[in-house]
Structures are given as C-alpha cells and as structure tokens.
Amino acid sequence: MRLGQDVLDASIQAYVGIKLTPKFGRDVQKRFARMPEIQLLCAVSGEFNYVAWLRADSPDRLNDLLDEIGALEGVERTTTSIILARKIDRTG
C-alpha cells in the first residue's frame, strides 16, 4: 500500500468466515466467483470452510453482499469482521 492510499480508497473491507453444509463447496465457490466484491477466497482449516476478503463501496452494499452470501444454498453461517485499520501490510 502506498502512502495516502487509505485516503483515496473509501471502500469498506471485511473478512468473512463462511461455514458450509458438506458437499456444497464447489457450487458455492462458483457463485462466489461471480461476485466482484470478493477480492480473495481461501479454503481454511478449523471452524470455517472459507475465509473471504470483501471490498464494498458502502456499508449498504456490504450489508447486501453479506445477505446474498448468507442466502446461498449450502451456506450454514457467516461471521464478519470489518477492517478498521491496517497495522502491517506487506502485500503491496
């Protein structure tokens, strides 16, 4: 991330843990691929099957997107954490 990028980027970012019903992973993954706000999707071990990094233009769009994800067949539940600040960022 370059200096000042946070000021220019007013989007809302969140990490979402997604728990699936067994055997729905491939179908859910295909649906996620059609959602441009999903910046990164990782299969993980532990409580969730996936963790997704979302970027939305507004709180309302984030809310709608979370509703869309939660309504997908095979999604049992989600847990969302909105990113407040980046303290260390080595991705750029």
Image (spheres, rainbow, N blue to C red):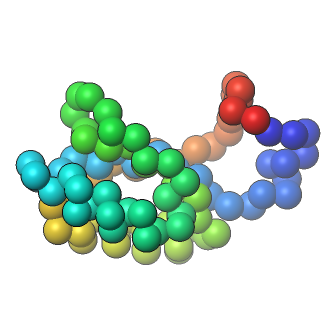
Does residue 38 appear to the left or right of 20 in the view shown?
right
Camera-nearest residue between 66 and 59: 66
Residue 33 locus on image (x, y percent): 42, 63
Inspect this view and state whether residue 20 appears. Answer: yes
As drawn, 21 above or below 72 = above
Residue in view at x 90 percent, y 39 percent? 3
Residue in view at x 74 percent, y 61 percent? 10
Residue in view at x 25 percent, y 41 percent? 49
The quadrant in which residue 59 appears is bottom right
In this view, the residue farthest toward the right is 3
The quadrant in which residue 91 appears is top right
Does residue 62 appear to the left or right of 2 in the view shown?
left
Camera-nearest residue between 69 and 36: 36
Q: How many marks?
A: 0
Does residue 88 appear to the left or right of 81 in the view shown?
right
Residue in view at x 58 percent, y 44 percent? 83
As drawn, 41 above or below 74 = above
Camera-nearest residue between 91 and 88: 91
Residue 32 locus on image (x, y percent): 38, 63
Residue 6 locus on image (x, y percent): 80, 48
Inspect this view and state whether residue 63 appears. Answer: no
For the C terminus, give its image quadrant: top right
For the N terminus, give its image quadrant: top right
